[in-house]
């Protein structure tokens, strides 16, 4: 493992590694086939700064308005010993009246150090798991740890993990609205993925201390505002699928060696920061290093990878169909470039044997299009 | 005496304006001088206000002390009023809501934020000079300041400690206190109903059937029924922690909590 870490550190160069959050770990599930991203993430390289250095500064991250709205809603749910959450849990999950203990874990004394908080959280959760009923019901902002590619990632369920009927449930508080019982599927999926990371971290915590990891339920509770009000509703989400995906992707991160072996000598993402931390690495050289590792660009990358603009540009330059997303790529299976597809449609290119069917479909589409014109 | 207070307040306001003007001129010597003067006048104001309060307390025949007019009462007194009504540690948000529902005058949220620090500083510079201090609640496990909960120093230690069940018990007690204040018809405002409702919706059996207004009597009964469930466990936890605090902490720490410091060599890794 050590030699692997040394190799990854060499790849990253003189920059300090970027930590993982539940959001970034969940994001790893997106486009798992991208070797470029896998290597950058595993080495802890700062994709944001690398992207900026090679000429594609990203406007990446959550909107400050969304963050503020989320914070206010979370505060509201947790106010007065999480009174509103308690009501929901009693109504929806039959939490007994006796179970109302509330433990804030966002600091230990006045200290908010991650490691200290993680230890404090561990102690409290283990006590609850071992002693059962009386030892706590609501745990506000616990700090969990998860090993990702040989490094410790600190995870803070931005919400509460609690114990109902002897099981732990992860609670996610999200501020996107459930309107008429309908939610934006993409946002729920993202929340479920993030929650799955927390479930995994909680399970590992219990397993590490000789307790049954299954005490942590695979059902997470999603608390969201109803319609256009601030009234919260709770829904149960089964995250088994996401859990399996997160496990897979983490396992792959630790098999990053195979990717490293395939790397040409001397490739590095080092930004060569000077004393002030400003990058000095030659942008062209850095870009060349990035091009050496195959990427798999998809339009969805822009939602979760800071380097997406760079890869899109690469795909465009290579005339690749990837810029249109996997659906188009799938439909035109076997045809790789925009040029080839257009050639087949316009009949300027003779289809190979296995392209005959696609060529027919493309030519048909082209006649329809020119008919419209 | 009231007139003296007002005169002092005028002077404080004038001094603050001069301090700002001097700051704009970047005249630091003058700023220092003016601020020292400001502190002297503020102290004089405190002493006078305390004396007034003592006088009022010594006149038992006097009817209910008149509600102090809103704008002239400093924030700490507003907070004290609200906490006395509630009788339990409360978060700034709840303090603001109760204040809006039952008391005249403004209580800016920004003042609440700086209050805790000011109070601790004031206590440390001259312990016991004021009749009460606003201090944080203490957590039952570490006896450290609990995040965002304000209490009054004159309360028994047990009431100022927060155990695992205390947030719930205190929420229910606050509901009883608010329902009681509403029943007494204490300066009701349109915010009163909203406050009652915010409590009632989170307590089983506290909302009336249908869409009518909240019944304070029903709210009280529902809250008390749930308090009865948690009371013993909560009382035990608080009493045990209070015992520990009495044995281990000095006077200042019993009010403002212990500070947890990282032990060298054992600091966070990774």
Image (cartoon, helix red, strand yellow):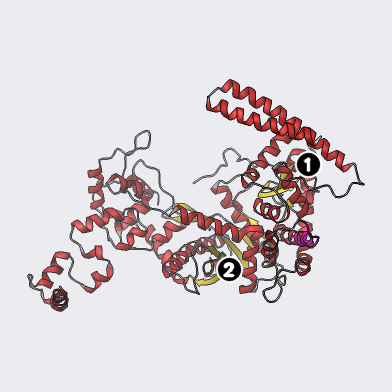
In the foreground, A71 or A321: A71
Residue A233 located within the stretch drawn in magenta: no
Q: Which residues are magenta?
A: B175-186
| SS category of the residue bearing label 2 | helix
Q: Secondary structure at mark 1?
A: loop
Query: Residue B59, percent across and down?
Result: 90, 43
The quarter holding residue A309 reads bottom left
Task: Confirm whether the magenta stretch covers residue B183.
Answer: yes
Q: In which quadrant is the N terminus of chain B drawn?
A: top right
The chain ID associated with circle 1 is B
The one of A148 and A333 positioned closer to us in this rendering: A333
Residue drawn at the location 24% of the way across and 64% of the way down? A322
Query: Where residue A364 sits in the image (x, y, percent)?
Result: 15, 78
Q: Nearer the viewer, mark 2 or mark 1?
A: 1
Chain under label 2? A
Residue closest to the far top: B29
Left or right of A165, for residue A252: left
Disc assigned to residue B132: 1
């Amino acid at each position: 493992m050590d030699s692997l870490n040394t190799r990854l550190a060499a790849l990253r160069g003189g920059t300090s590694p970027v930590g993982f959050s539940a959001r970034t770990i969940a994001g790893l599930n997106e486009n798992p086939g991208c070797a470029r991203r896998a290597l950058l993430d595993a080495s802890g390289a700062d994709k944001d700064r690398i992207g900026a250095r090679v000429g594609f500064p990203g406007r990446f991250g959550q909107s400050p308005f969304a963050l503020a709205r989320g914070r206010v809603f979370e505060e509201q749910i947790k106010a007065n010993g999480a009174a509103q959450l308690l009501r929901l849990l009693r109504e929806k999950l039959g939490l007994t009246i006796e179970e109302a203990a509330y433990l804030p874990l966002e600091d230990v004394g006045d200290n908010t150090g991650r490691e200290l908080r993680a230890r404090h959280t561990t102690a409290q959760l283990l006590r609850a798991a071992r002693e059962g009923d009386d030892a706590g019901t609501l745990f506000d902002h616990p700090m969990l740890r998860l090993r990702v590619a040989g490094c410790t990632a600190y995870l803070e369920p931005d919400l509460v993990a609690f114990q109902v009927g002897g099981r732990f449930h992860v609670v996610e508080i999200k501020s996107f609205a459930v309107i008429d019982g309908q939610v934006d599927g993409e946002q729920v999926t993202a929340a479920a993925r993030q929650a799955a990371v927390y479930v995994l971290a909680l399970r590992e915590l219990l397993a590490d201390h000789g307790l049954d990891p299954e005490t942590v339920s695979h059902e997470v509770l999603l608390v969201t505002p109803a319609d256009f009000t601030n009234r919260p509703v709770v829904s149960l989400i089964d995250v088994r699928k996401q859990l399996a995906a997160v496990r897979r992707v983490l396992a792959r991160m630790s098999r990053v060696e195979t990717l490293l072996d395939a790397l040409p000598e001397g490739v590095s993402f080092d930004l060569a920061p000077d004393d002030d931390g400003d990058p000095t690495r030659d942008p062209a050289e850095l870009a060349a290093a990035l091009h050496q590792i195959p990427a798999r660009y998809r339009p969805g990358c822009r939602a979760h990878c800071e380097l997406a603009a760079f890869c899109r540009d690469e795909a465009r330059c290579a005339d690749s169909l990837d810029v249109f997303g996997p659906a188009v790529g799938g439909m035109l299976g076997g045809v790789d470039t925009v040029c080839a597809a257009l050639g087949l449609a316009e009949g300027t290119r003779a289809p190979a044997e296995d392209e005959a069917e696609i060529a027919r479909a493309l030519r048909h589409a082209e006649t329809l299009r020119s008919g419209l014109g | 005496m009231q007139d003296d207070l007002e005169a002092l307040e005028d002077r404080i306001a004038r001094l603050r304006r001069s301090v700002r003007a001097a700051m704009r001129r970047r005249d630091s010597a003058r700023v220092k001088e003016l601020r020292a003067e400001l502190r002297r006048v503020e102290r004089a104001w405190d002493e006078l206000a305390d004396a007034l309060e003592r006088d009022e307390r010594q006149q038992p025949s006097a009817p209910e002390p008149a509600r102090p007019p809103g704008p002239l009462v400093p924030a700490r007194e507003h907070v004290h009023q609200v906490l006395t009504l509630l009788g339990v540690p409360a978060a700034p948000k709840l303090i603001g809501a109760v204040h809006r529902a039952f008391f005249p005058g403004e209580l800016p949220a920004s003042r609440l934020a700086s209050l805790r620090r000011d109070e601790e500083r004031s206590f440390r510079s001259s312990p016991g000079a004021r009749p009460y201090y606003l201090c944080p609640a203490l957590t039952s496990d570490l006896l450290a300041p609990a995040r965002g909960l304000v209490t009054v120093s004159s309360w028994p230690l047990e009431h100022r400690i927060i155990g695992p069940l205390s947030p719930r018990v205190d929420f229910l007690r606050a509901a009883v206190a608010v329902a009681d204040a509403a029943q007494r018809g204490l300066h009701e405002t349109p915010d009163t109903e909203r406050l009652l409702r915010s409590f009632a919706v989170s307590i089983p059996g506290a909302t009336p059937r249908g869409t009518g207004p909240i019944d304070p009597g029903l709210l009280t009964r529902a809250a008390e029924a749930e308090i009865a469930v948690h009371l013993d466990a909560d009382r035990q936890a608080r009493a045990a922690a209070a015992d520990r605090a009495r044995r281990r902490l000095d006077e200042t720490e019993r009010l403002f909590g212990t500070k947890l410091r990282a032990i060298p060599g054992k600091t966070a890794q990774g």
